[in-house]
Image: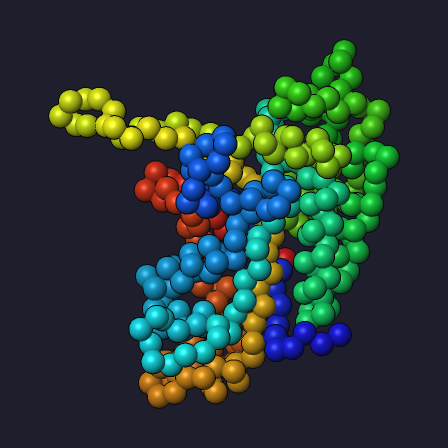
């Protein structure tokens, strides 16, 4: 299957190392400053937000590389970005557990999305096909709750014979199936080995995601009067630290840049590219990013992990 004009694809995980606020810039019924969501209500990170964060990081680190993401507004040279970034969807997220403090949760709906991204990328990189089949296998299990080894001992409450997540979802011990495949999935998506992971029904996962979002009321103070200024009270939400997203980076070949750029700028980029494609160079320089708002209060730090 051809995927022109793209020549390369990378499936990339985005692991939040702090709370995230990829905002939409307007209020909702619940909060004033809401996070980005997909059509069914799960949090997402738009490709434009990821791309903007990479561009900001490159501007500070290696400014010449920003042209791998397209021209600046004031540039005379106009060309399409040789790198496309897809919307980032959740793969797993942490939730409170009455025993064991917390666990990571996924569900068939999220895993099928993950598999679709892997399938798309496999048209340009065959290594993703095998990973896709393993993810699809877990997503197809409906009669049990696949979990990592040791999940029962860590989270099931003695006497109750179930795990209680976010004080509202009971997961019966008899329905939990600990599987090596879930250990492999946990490792694949960059979770630490001591952490647990379980795949629940879609509806339960959606409810747990909503309960796990962080919603904070903030104020702006009149320093002279020591009171809240008029209009200086608002609420905002954030995605919890430890949430893992998946996206796909698609890249044109190096020849495309040679056609688009000329002179000194092309020579500068050639020094970076050498024997590598633009997408490989970009991901090498974008291991850690700051995505979304509230950077100055410690939100938005993420790690990019290539699958």
Res 17 seen here: no
Res 282 seen here: yes
Q: Quadrant of the C terminus?
A: bottom right
Q: Is residue 274 left or right of residue 13?
A: left
Residue at screen point 78% across, 17% down: 161
Residue 205, position as x, y percentages in the image: 68, 34
Residue at screen point 75% across, 34% down: 201
Residue at the extreme top of the image, as rendered:
159
Residues 109 and 251: in front is 109
Q: Quadrant of the N terminus?
A: bottom right
Q: Is residue 254 above or below residue 56?
A: below
Residue at the extreme left of the image, as rendered:
224
Residue 178, position as x, y percentages in the image: 79, 35
What colouring does the structure picture have?
Answer: rainbow
Residue 102, quarter of the rendered image: top right
Q: Is residue 283 left or right of residue 201?
A: left
Residue at screen point 57% across, 52% down: 88
Q: How many marks?
A: 0
Residue 143, position as x, y percentages in the image: 86, 35
Q: Is residue 87 left or right of residue 270?
A: right
Residues 43 and 189: in front is 43
Residue at screen point 80% across, 30% down: 176
Residue 128, quarter of the rendered image: bottom right
Q: Is residue 135 above or below residue 286?
A: above
């Amino acid at each position: 299957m051809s995927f022109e004009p793209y020549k390369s694809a990378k499936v990339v995980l985005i692991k939040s190392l702090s709370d995230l606020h990829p905002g939409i810039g307007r209020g909702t019924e619940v909060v004033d400053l809401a996070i980005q969501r997909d059509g069914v209500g799960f949090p997402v990170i738009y490709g434009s937000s990821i791309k903007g964060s990479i561009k900001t990081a490159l501007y500070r680190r290696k400014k010449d590389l920003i042209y791998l993401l397209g021209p600046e507004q004031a540039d005379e040279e106009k060309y399409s970005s040789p790198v496309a970034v897809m919307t980032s969807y959740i793969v797993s997220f942490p939730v409170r557990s009455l025993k064991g403090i917390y666990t990571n949760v996924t569900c068939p709906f999220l895993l099928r999305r993950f598999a679709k991204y892997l399938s798309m990328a496999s048209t340009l990189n065959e290594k993703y096909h095998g990973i896709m089949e393993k993810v699809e296998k877990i997503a197809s299990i409906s009669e049990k709750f696949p979990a990592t080894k040791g999940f029962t001992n860590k989270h099931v409450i003695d006497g109750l014979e179930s795990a209680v997540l976010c004080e509202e979802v009971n997961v019966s011990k008899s329905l939990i199936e600990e599987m090596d495949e879930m250990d492999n999935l946990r490792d694949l998506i960059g979770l630490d080995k001591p952490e647990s992971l379980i795949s629940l029904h879609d509806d339960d996962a959606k409810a747990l995601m909503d309960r796990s979002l962080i919603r904070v009321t903030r104020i702006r103070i009149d320093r002279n009067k020591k009171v809240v200024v008029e209009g200086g009270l608002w609420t905002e939400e954030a995605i919890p630290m430890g949430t893992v997203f998946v996206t796909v980076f698609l890249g044109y070949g190096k020849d495309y840049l040679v056609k688009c750029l000329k002179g000194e700028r092309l020579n500068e980029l050639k020094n970076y590219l050498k024997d590598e494609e633009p997408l490989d160079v970009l991901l090498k320089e974008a291991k850690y990013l700051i995505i979304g708002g509230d950077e100055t209060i410690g939100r938005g730090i993420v790690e990019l992990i290539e699958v």
